[in-house]
Image: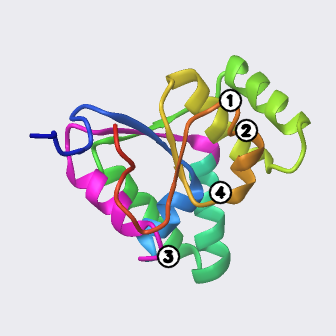
Amino acid sequence: MPEKSKKKTGSAYILDAHAVLAFLEAEEGGELIKSLLSDHGTRFYLSVVNLGEIYYIILRERGRDAAEKVEAELNLLKNIRVVDVTWKRAKTAGEFKARGGISYADCFAAALALEKKAPLLTGDREFERVSDTIQIVWLKGESLPPNF
């Protein structure tokens, strides 16, 4: 009997601002993020640059109280690790940015995905520019593709 596909326990993923905002605002793809976050064996990495991006978007759209509340809620999620910028990661982000067509903040998520050898969860089509270098799981409100 064929084995059913299901995500691997202990998997690691990279989150970008799009994925986190989809989760927080119950947008398309947010259910997948919610499902993955509920598996405490799954690890997530979020660049501090992308956390700053999330913060400024919430600040701009809903004000300081909401932005600080989101920051506090994300800090409570124990399986998300916010990682600082290193020169090596910044240099890789710069190399991605030089390709054009992708925001500098997104380049940090891509650089982190390359470094951690982990798939990036996103719905942001700008990442098509680096899909030849990193693995991307596109958020479409669906479950993970086979072999995840």
Q: State how far apart marks 2 and 4 are (Cα).
A: 19 Å
Label pair 1/4, CB-CB below 8 angstroms:
no
The residues tagged by marks 3 and 4 sit, at their Cα atoms, a distance apart of: 16 Å
Name the side, left or right, on which 124 lies relative to 31.
Answer: right
Does any portion of residue 148 appear in the rendered image?
no
Boundaries of the magenta span: 26-49
Above/below status of 57 relative to 122: below
Q: Secondary structure at mark 4?
A: helix
Q: Amino acid at mark 4?
A: Glu
Q: Residue at x 79, y 50 (%)?
A: 103
How would you rate the neighbour count of disc 4 (Cα within 10 Å): few for under 14, some for 14-19, many for 20 or more?
Answer: some
- Upstream in sequence: badge 2 or badge 4: 4
State the residue at coordinates (30%, 42%). 79
SS at circle 3: helix
Neighbour tally class for label 2: few under 14, some 14-19, many 20 plus, Cα within 10 Å: some
Between the C-alphas of marks 1 and 2, the distance is: 5 Å
Disc number for residue 133: 1
Mark before the other along the chain sequence, 3 or 4: 4
> Upstream in the sequence, badge 2 or badge 3?
3
Asked if the residues shown at circle 1 and circle 2 are in contact, with their CB atoms under 8 angstroms apart, the answer is yes
Q: Position of residue 129 (x, y in %)?
A: 78, 44
Marks 1, 4: nearer the viewer: 1
**Mark number displayed over residue 53:** 4
Type of amino acid at the residue the image marks with label 3:
Asp
Q: Which mark is residue 65?
A: 3
Q: Is residue 22 left or right of residue 12?
A: right
Figure check: 36 above or below 86: below
